[in-house]
Amino acid sequence: MTNWSDVEGKLSSLISNNFFNKVFEDINRFKDISEKAKRIKDPFFGDDEARKNAWDQWHLDTEKFYNETDSERLFIYLLINIFDYQVAQHSSNYFTEFLFNQLKKFEVNLGNYIEKESQNENYQSNANDIFMKFQIKNKVNILNFNYTNPFDSMEFDEISKISNIHGTTDDPIIGVDSENVNTNNNLNFNQFTKTYRIMNNSEDRVDILPDNIENIYFYGHSLALADYSYFQSIFDFYDLYGSNLNLVFYYSVYDESKKNEIINNNINNIWNLINKYGESMSNSQGKNLLHKLNLENRIKIIEIQ
């Protein structure tokens, strides 16, 4: 994986309905290969030549299986072996609960890692320096997709409210966008969505959207599909097409040798986000949304140095 958002992209692929249908369709094939290996290892299997021929055939069968199987499904089979998960003894929904528990373990380790990294003496000062470079003149609310709050110990006249929408290092949320989950089957994937997880933490939510704003500022977000529903809801709330709302995308060049790559990736992410939102609009206006925003100079891409 080359980007942090790829973690949630892989998770989205992992819990897709087509994926699980494939898993349970060919699970017996995987079990047959495993059982064949056990039989060959049996000391009473046969003579050396028979054992060699059996192993040769087993390797051919295994190679064919792995060549025909995508990486996410292979991950499931590795889980089955590593954790000795007894597929035949449990239902498919029990399996999704098993995967969810593994996700929770990952989140705990992730939270511990981020908490340790954020204790760096430069972390808070760097974050505060970057915020001041935005040159924001009015009060702002911060919808924070990170698990830390570098502004917590300092007072900024510019900040009204802060919401850590995906939790803190104590309870980080890793999940997928709800639109990527098809509920029309017997498998319960809702608990893997960020919407579901946030509902469980409703007492911690902060009303972050004021009635009237002129600008939405973005910084440090990959604009990945895992968070698309948030952007769609915000754009709907403020009537992105019909209003005078400006979208201001800040970015930093963290590696001069990759400057062009960073800029191009940033622009492509913005392009994809706006066009995807345009597709959600029920009329032809959505097709020219990006063009309209550009003509009206309502998209601004600014480097923070």
Image: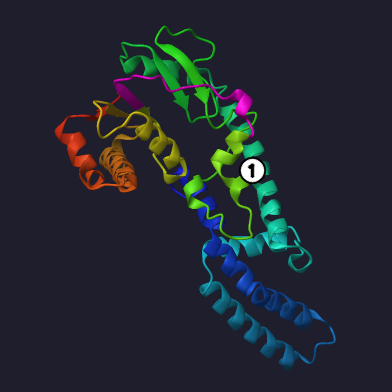
Q: Is residue 126 visible?
A: no
Which of 94 and 154 lies nearest the eye of the viewer? 94
Left/right placement of residue 97 relative to residue 125 reads: right
The amino acid type found where label 1 is placed reads: Phe
Circle 1 sits on which residue?
Answer: 106
Magenta-colored segment: predominant secondary structure: loop
Residue located farthest toward the right when viewing the structure as drawn? 44
> Where 182 falls versus 50 (above or below)?
above
> Where 19 falls versus 118 (above or below)?
below
**Residue density around tag 1, few if under 14, some if 14–19, many if 20 or more, within 10 Å:** some
Left/right placement of residue 255 relative to residue 149 reads: left
Find residue 263 and report its image quarter.
Answer: top left
Which of 2 and 21 lies nearest the eye of the viewer? 21
Q: Residue at x 63, y 39 (%)?
A: 107
Q: Is residue 76 visible?
A: yes
Residue located farthest toward the left when viewing the structure as drawn? 295
Q: Where does the image place residue 211, in percent across and percent down from the top left?
A: 38, 20
> Where 138 falls versus 232 (above or below)?
above
Q: Where does the image place residue 264, in percent across and percent down from the top left?
A: 26, 42
The verdict on residue 252 being magenta is no
In this figure, what is the number of numbered marks? 1
Q: Residue at x 57, y 22 (%)?
A: 119
Q: Residue at x 38, y 30 (%)?
A: 237
Magenta segment = 200-217
Image quarter of the C terminus: top left
Left/right placement of residue 20 relative to residue 255 reads: right
Q: Secondary structure at mark 1?
A: helix
Q: Where does the image place residue 292, in percent across and percent down from the top left?
A: 18, 37
Q: Where does the image place residue 46, in percent across and percent down from the top left?
A: 80, 91
The verdict on residue 212 being magenta is yes
